[in-house]
């Protein structure tokens, strides 16, 4: 497995763990528990979409590194447009669900651009250290001090939560659930951000755990 593939697989495990924890926490909130059967398939497809987008960004960071190019705003903008293709496939998949969605890019674009920029920079830094180190944990330690790594992980997950919150406000729900929409979006972000803080802390502890001899 190449460093790019290994980093993309690590990112996928993070996002899938994050999604599972979020869904479990949602079941404990009454308004969300009522709506969960309707929105849970949306959340599952949404995390698959995010994995695709992140993999695209990580691969682009690897390409830039191989060509000796530093990622810039033009690359971030190109990646944003590429993620819109992934959005179109996502919308086609959710069209069969009992909810509808309209992606409002005027709200989502600045959040997504920021997340792409931060992930692109992180992937570039980590992949740049990978060849000199024996595993992904060592590469992450070389790229980031402990506190900065936890902060970066939380920021990436928080931006994911913000975009998901924005998408949830655009859900077309059955009439009985429409009054819950804003509460769903608010509670969803609070739950996702709390999960992001815990997961970032746990991941950082794993990365900085002493190596076994």
Image: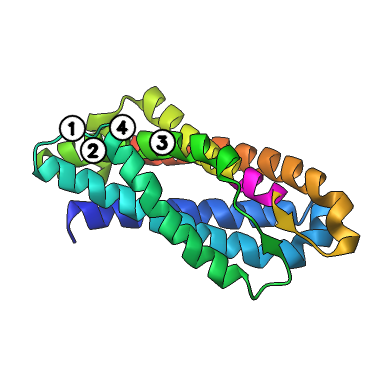
Q: For the residues labelled 1 and 4, say whether their Cβ atoms are less than 8 Å apart.
A: no
The Cα–Cα distance between marks 1 and 2, rounded to whole angstroms, is: 8 Å
Tell me the residue that label 1 is attached to. Answer: 70
Q: Nearer the viewer, mark 4 or mark 2?
A: 4
Quadrant of the image occupied by residue 65: top left
Q: Which numbered tag is attached to residue 124?
A: 2
| Residue occupying image coordinates x 73% and y 71% | 98
Circle count: 4
Local secondary structure at mark 2:
helix
Give the camera-side residue of 98 and 153.
98
Which of the two discs, 3 and 2, labels the residue nearer the N terminus? 2
For residue 152, side relative to residue 36 (left or right): left
Q: Which numbered tag is attached to residue 204?
A: 3
What is the x, y in percent for residue 151? 45, 27
The Cα–Cα distance between marks 4 and 2, rounded to whole angstroms, is: 14 Å
| Residue occupying image coordinates x 44% and y 51% | 14
Tell me the residue that label 4 is attached to. Answer: 73
Q: Which numbered tag is attached to residue 211?
A: none
Q: For the residues labelled 3 and 1, say whether their Cβ atoms are less than 8 Å apart.
A: no
What is the x, y in percent for residue 37? 75, 67
Which of the two discs, 1 and 2, labels the residue nearer the N terminus? 1
Q: Nearer the viewer, mark 4 or mark 3?
A: 4
Local secondary structure at mark 4:
helix
Q: Nearer the viewer, mark 3 or mark 1?
A: 1
**Residue 11 in view (yes/no):** no
Q: For the residues labelled 3 and 2, say whether their Cβ atoms are less than 8 Å apart.
A: no
Packing grade of label 4 (10 A; few <14, some 14-19, many >=20) is few
């Amino acid at each position: 497995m190449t460093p790019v593939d290994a980093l993309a697989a690590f990112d996928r495990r993070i996002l899938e763990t994050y999604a599972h924890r979020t869904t479990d926490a949602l079941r404990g909130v009454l308004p969300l528990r009522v709506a969960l059967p309707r929105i849970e398939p949306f959340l599952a497809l949404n995390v698959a979409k995010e994995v695709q987008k992140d993999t695209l960004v990580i691969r682009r960071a690897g390409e830039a590194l191989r060509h000796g190019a530093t990622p810039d705003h033009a690359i971030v903008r190109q990646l944003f447009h590429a993620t819109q293709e992934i959005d179109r496939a996502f919308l086609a998949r959710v069209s069969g669900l009992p909810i509808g969605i309209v992606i409002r890019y005027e709200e989502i674009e600045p959040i997504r651009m920021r997340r792409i920029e931060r992930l692109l920079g992180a992937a570039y830094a980590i992949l740049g250290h990978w060849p000199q180190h024996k595993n992904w944990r060592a590469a992450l330690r070389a790229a980031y001090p402990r506190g900065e790594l936890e902060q970066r992980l939380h920021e990436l997950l928080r931006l994911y939560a913000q975009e998901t919150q924005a998408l949830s406000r655009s859900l077309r729900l059955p009439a009985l659930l429409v009054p819950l929409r804003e509460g769903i979006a608010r509670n969803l972000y609070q739950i996702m951000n709390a999960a992001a803080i815990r997961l970032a802390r746990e991941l950082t502890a794993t990365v900085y755990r002493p190596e076994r001899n």
